[in-house]
Image (cartoon, rainbow, N blue to C red):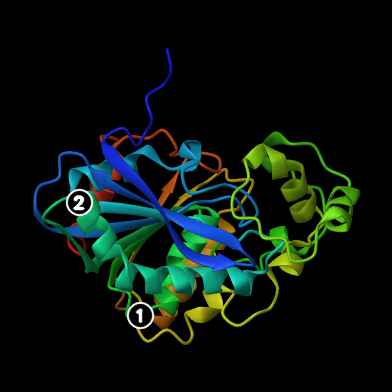
Amino acid sequence: MATPSKYSDFDQKDVVYKTVNDQDISTTILVPRNITPGKHPLLVHFHGGFLICGSKLYEEWHATWTIQLAAQKNAILVTPNYRLLPEANGREVLDDINDFWSWVKTSLPSEVAKMAKGVEVDTTNTLVAGESAGGYLAIQSSLLHPSAGIKAVISQYGMLDNKIPHFTQKGQKHMAGAPQQPESEVDDYLQDMQKGAVRTETHPWEMWLFICATVQAGRYLEFLGDGVGVHAIDNLETAERVPACWIIHGKEDSLVPIEASNNFVDKLKQTHPITPLRYTIQPGEHGFDGAVNMDEDWVKEGCAWLEKYWP
């Protein structure tokens, strides 16, 4: 018997929010099936995958409890694709996120109204959440888009400091038990890559060896690039305000070491001491909360804290 979809309590619609080199980039709108007419909050979710793989509806990496949170709060859930590395660079990914937030303001309300009669999405009452690279994009959204109506952010094991040695130095790194990969895995992919290609979704296992080899070789920043704003931790220095932040990380994370969140939290406390902050550290590897429900104690406590800021 097939496992029910995590999105079974929602009606879905895919919408193109931008086009690059004749390639459509889309987002999925999910509206709770039991929603009632009226104004409802927004929950934007960014998928993970090192900015290299994954897709907007890859369920295994979308934490169950955040989907349940959207259903519980009768929130409109929106999850976009974006261009992926190494075909794109970090600045181009952020350009997509910028265009996505513009689309949210100009087009999401009418799309929701078509899906559910009498339902209005409140784009001034937004929670942004994401896992891994999605946590990075959630935090980046809050720092780079102060007018987006973001009330709170959840970063689950996010890549919040991409300049730690794990990403920049070559060495032995046992990523989720994977063996060391030859650096040729990276060079072979780059050699075969078509100029101008746009890739917006890829099953994780198709890029897993490339990801391992890239990180083990210390070459991640080569593909992220040094475009304006690509380092979330640096953006804290120029952000006028930062909404409430719930940072979550597993102690045994071998893909994005907890050092990344530790560094971000420390800097956030320095640059924005009045920003409401909750830092949850749990036992576990990367993606430890993928199947966690809302009845887990640490989730219940965090969601109770979150209610002060959203919805």
Task: Name above or below for residue 105 compared with residue 60.
Answer: below
| Picture quarter with the C terminus | bottom left
Q: Quadrant of residue 94?
A: bottom right
Q: Residue at position x 85%, y 47% from top?
A: 185
The answer to whether marks 2 and 1 mark residues whose Cβ atoms lie closer than 8 Å is no
Image quarter in which the N terminus is found: top left
Residue 179, disc: none
Q: What residue is disc 2 on?
A: 304
Question: What amino acid is labelled 1 in the image?
Answer: Pro
Residue identified by numbered label 1 = 146
Q: How many angstroms separate mark 2 from mark 1 (CA)? A: 24 Å
Residue that extends furthest to the top in the rendered view of this protein: 1
User: As drawn, is 100 to the left or to the right of 105?
Assistant: right
Q: Position of residue 29 (x, y in %)?
A: 34, 51
Is the residue marked by circle 2 packed among few (<14), some (14-19), or many (20+) residues within 10 Å?
few
Which image quarter: residue 298? top left
Residue 281 seen? yes
